[in-house]
Image (cartoon, rainbow, N blue to C red):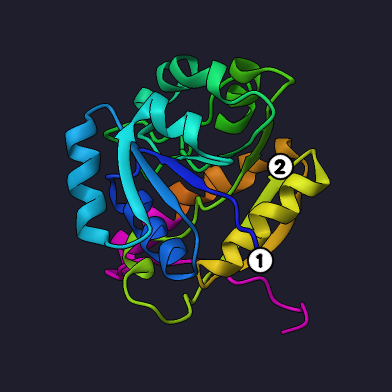
Amino acid sequence: MDRPTIAIIGGTGDLGSGLAGRWAAAGYSVVLGSRSREKADAAAAKIGAGVRGDDNLGAAQAGDIVVIAVPYSNHDAILAEIRDALTGKIVVDAAVPLVPPKVSVVQLPSEGSGAQVARRILGDGVKVTSAFHNVGAKKLRGDGPVDCDVLVFGDDRAAKEAVIALAQAAGTRGIDGGPLSNSAAAEALTSVLIGINRRYKVDGAGIRITGLPA
């Protein structure tokens, strides 16, 4: 079965590298993007077979599906930098609009969500989805099932189905969360989960949607 090549912009970070390892193990070709090609190469070598590094633009050009896993402070600038390489592709925005130092307080952008900002920057020629906001990076270590559901948002049904398949391949359960505008709920929930982690002294609180077939 042909599998899309997945580019992860911000792939040297905890979330990006965790997803890369999971997808490579599932048989996908993965390209890690970073501002530094050397840093991306080094991170790819640590993950192993099926993963290579490139700079952000090169990774975006190589990927059939492009995952944005960068700190939100760099989100807009990086999207503008790689925009021309994304036309016609599925983009998965996993960035969360956290505003230090109060990262456990919900502070969404005026446009409603980071994903809606991404759609404005990238334009109608890109199939913008959002997902993977509520998966703690440490949950992705190892190779067993991940005790967490992933909400996937988007306005293109086929694009959402492709991202749900990626969630399944990463060992999570992907769930259709509705239109892209609903991404605000998952983005906000990230701050809530950070607060729960701190108050209850746990590592990687996640979410489960009950009442669905197993």
Q: In the image, is residue 211 above or below residue 92?
A: below
Residue at the image point whose x is 39% and y is 56% from the top: 20
Residue at left 64%, top 27%?
116
As for residue 37 lying within the magenta part, the answer is no
Q: CA distance from mark 2 to mark 1?
A: 32 Å
As drawn, which residue projects farthest toward the right?
157
Q: Is residue 151 left or right of residue 40?
A: right
Is residue 45 among what the camera can see?
Answer: yes
Q: Magenta segment range?
A: 193-214
State the predominant SS element of the stretch in magenta: loop
Give the amino acid type for the residue marked by disc 2 in the picture: Asn
Is residue 107 something one can see in this rendering? no
Query: Closer to the N terminus: mark 2 or mark 1?
Result: 1
Tell me the residue that label 1 is attached to. Answer: 1
Dot 2 lies on which element?
A: helix
Q: Amino acid at mark 1?
A: Met
Disc 2 target residue: 182
Of residues 82 and 52, the one drawn nearer to the viewer in this rendering: 52
Tell me the residue at 47%/75% (across/down): 146
**Residue 36 horizontal side relative to residue 179, left or right:** left
Position in image of residue 104 (x %, y %): 38, 45
Q: Position of residue 5 (x, y in %)?
A: 53, 48
Residue at left offset 28%, top offset 46%: 13
Badge 1 marks a residue whose secondary structure is loop
Q: Which mark, by number, is residue 93?
A: none
Quadrant position of residue 143:
bottom left
Q: Is residue 163 above or below residue 56?
A: below
Q: Is residue 177 above or below residue 140?
A: above
Q: Is residue 204 above or below residue 113?
A: below
Q: Where is residue 173 drawn, in percent x and y?
A: 61, 70
| x and y percentages locating residue 127 in the rendered image | 70, 33
> Where does the C terminus fall, quadrant-wise?
bottom right
